[in-house]
Amino acid sequence: MKEKKENTLAWYVVHTRPKCEHIAASMMAGLEGVETYCPRIRFQKSTRRGKVWFVEALFPSYFFARFIPSESMRAVKYSQSVIRVVDFGGSLTSVPDRAIAELKKEMHDVEICEVLVDVKVGDTVELTEGPMRGLKGIVNAMLSGADRVRVLLEFLGRENAVEVPLSKILTEHKPRAVVAPR
């Protein structure tokens, strides 16, 4: 049975150094007989410099490679930034083709999928700019116009409603949770 498994073209999970998934996948894609798939997400995050776009792997430190182990295992194992090909108890385990197909469908058949983290009434947010920077409050209303929200802040012993641009708040929602809601 092991002989048959090692001569079959299949998808495998490859473990890489942190933040090197896309580099390892692109280097490995240049190998003959190896196909790679490294799904990534692009999202906006508030920082001290304001809102900044980030691109990260959907599965940090992992990507998928399709190859025949008996022909390409050595080249895959020793590719740049690769730690190992994931196995269980020393036995190489493949990922079903339908699982990769479903993942590609979920990602809209692109390797970098843009994720928009929406803010809703009732969400806890943090102000990122201005004199009240760092204060947390609850979104009370979504206002029409220039993408503004009304936030209830507890300040000086009482609740105050403050209107702020959507771009000046940081939500507690994580981009990965938006991609895969529970």
Image (spheres, rainbow, N blue to C red):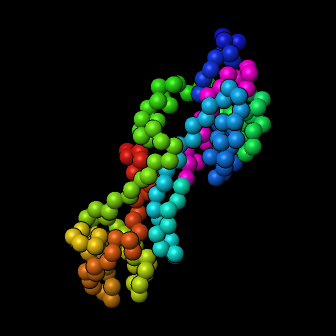
Residue at point 71%, 28% (across, down): 32
Residue 88 visible, this angle? no
Looking at the image, residue 45 lies above or below residue 105? below
Q: Quadrant of the N terminus?
A: top right
Residue at point 41%, 69% (across, down): 170
Residue at point 43%, 76% (across, down): 128
Looking at the image, residue 101 lies above or below residue 130? above
Q: Which residues are magenta?
A: 56-72
**Magenta-span inclusion, residue 180:** no
Residue 93 visible, this angle? yes
Tag count in the figure? 0
Q: Is residue 180 left or right of residue 142?
A: right
Q: Position of residue 106 (x, y in %)?
A: 41, 38
Q: Position of residue 141 (x, y in %)?
A: 22, 70
Residue at point 73%, 27% (across, down): 73
Looking at the image, residue 21 lies above or below residue 147? above
**Magenta-span inclusion, residue 66:** yes
Q: Is residue 82 left or right of residue 146?
A: right
The picture quadrant where one finds residue 85 is: top right
Q: Is residue 68 left or right of residue 95?
A: right
Q: Is residue 89 left or right of residue 132?
A: right
Front position in the image: 52 or 174: 52
Q: Quadrant of the C terminus?
A: top left
The picture quadrant where one finds residue 144 is: bottom left
Q: Position of residue 13 (x, y in %)?
A: 61, 34
Looking at the image, residue 9 lies above or below residue 4? below
Q: Position of residue 69 (x, y in %)?
A: 70, 23
